[in-house]
Image (spheres, grey):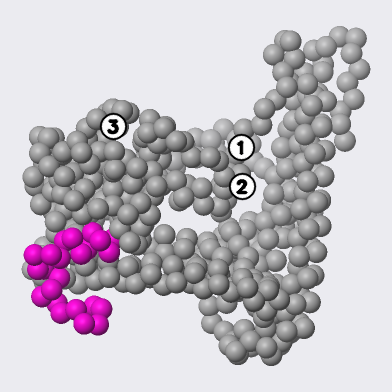
Amino acid sequence: MGLPGLRPRERSGPGALPRAISALSRALRGRPRPETFRKAKFDLPEAVAELWSLLFSLLWPVHQEGAVAPGDPPEALEGQIRFVKWVLHCYGYGRRHFYQLPEVGSHGSYELLLAFSWLLVYLSLPERFLYLNCVYQGDDAWICSCKDLASYPVPLALSCKGRVDIRYVQWLLGKLRFQWRSLYASQQEQCTLLNKIHLYTRGCHPDPSIGHLSVPEIELLRFPESSKQMLQQLESENSCLEAFLEWKHMELVYWQWMDTVLDANPIGIPNADKQDVFLPEILQYCSPKYLTGEMDRVQKNLEALRQRLQETVNQQRAAWHTKVSRCSQRLPRLPELSTAMMKEIQKTVECELAALEQGCGVKSWSHRLQRLVFREAGEPSHSGTHQMTKVIQVLRREEASLEKTFRRLQEECQQELAILARGLEGVIWILPP
């Protein structure tokens, strides 16, 4: 595979590396120069400031992607360095020499080059920025099935004794309910308007798989002067796509050069703890002998790991059986379950199975924007699409599960409040509903 007009021998020529880095710089933000990478290979201090700025310019938009309230970036170099170290630590970057670099940016260009290359693979930076620069012309909606929600610290008003005023907590709860109702009402209004636009513009779109116009396309028809800005955005996206294709064509050259960077090691740091990194997209350029050796090594490691896991499982299973047998001897014989209890257990099992099916079905959803396309009932849908009715069913099951968890936590809190109320003499405690 390759770009038209480029021969395979041109990828390994004397100017291949500058072309590869140039294509990479055009596909990313920050526009690093090829000379900066050469200086970083020999750990020259002239490249430190530019590499710190490059890492910050790459990580900041990725970190702010999808944020509810995007913050202002730090302007000082020290703040940017602390931010880069924090993000890399969150991603699991393990070279301790990187975290020992000074925050004044005096040296460490070699370590910064290694961190940049690690991020290039771990975060798939060219693909990520190609997605960020994409111009959307449809009506999109997020389909997110993440269980971990972002937590934001809420400043609590403490009394003179260091306790939280219950009236403040009730006020926060009321404010949260009001904002939730406002958000729900605005979403309902937006869905109603989208439905009208999709229904009234059916048959106006040149793509028969879509069949109707979107809100951005309607805005272009209403205000033709905004088409110039849209044209500029499309040209920028096209240039990023061309740079990305050129980078994928020259990527092997960069990683071959990185092998020489690791072998050079100008600052004398031992690479004993270095682990091999597999790049599936460039394995097609490796020799069959190398692939066979790597597969044999991986197979031996996996077999040894399987044996260790099997031994651990057998030990845990034997200990568990022993513990269960001891507990069963001490417990009295349980009476037979009544019909009501059997129905309750069956209902609980059905809920758990539904939650399990939901978790398995949600895995097929891609965590990204999905285009909304209007379809009449009974119309065939294309492969790879998601029916909103199925999505709504999954969300309703998730809502029921969260409601059940909320009720359980509420009962536990009421029990704890009742226990605390018993310790207060002469105080009448009325539990909230």
Residue pictured at 9% horizontal, 47% vertical: 263
Q: Which labelled disc corresponds to residue 68?
A: 2
Left or right: residue 187 compared with residue 114: right
Magenta stretch: includes residue 92: no
User: Mark 1 and 3 residues: CB-CB less than 8 Å, in contact?
Assistant: no
Expressed as whole percent of the image width and height from the top left, the position of residue 113 reads 23, 45
Q: Amino acid at mark 1?
A: Tyr
Q: Which labelled disc corresponds to residue 165?
A: none
User: Mark 1 and 2 residues: CB-CB less than 8 Å, in contact?
Assistant: yes
Q: Nearer the viewer, residue 118 or 246?
A: 246
Q: Secondary structure at mark 3?
A: loop
Expressed as whole percent of the image width and height from the top left, the position of residue 21 reads 23, 59
Q: Amino acid at mark 2?
A: Val
| The image quarter in which residue 51 lies | top left
In terms of sequence position, does the residue under pointer 2 or pointer 3 come before the other?
Answer: 2
Q: Amino acid at mark 3?
A: Gly
Q: Is residue 91 above or below residue 398?
A: above
Labels 1, 2: front one = 2
Expressed as whole percent of the image width and height from the top left, the position of residue 318 reads 38, 42
- The residue that mark 3 highlights is 105
Residue pictured at 71% horizontal, 54% vertical: 399
Magenta stretch: includes residue 11: yes
Q: Nearer the viewer, residue 90 or 306?
A: 90
* Alpha-carbon span between mark 2 and mark 3: 31 Å
Q: Which residues are magenta?
A: 1-24
Q: Which labelled disc corresponds to residue 152?
A: 1
* Alpha-carbon span between mark 1 and mark 3: 31 Å
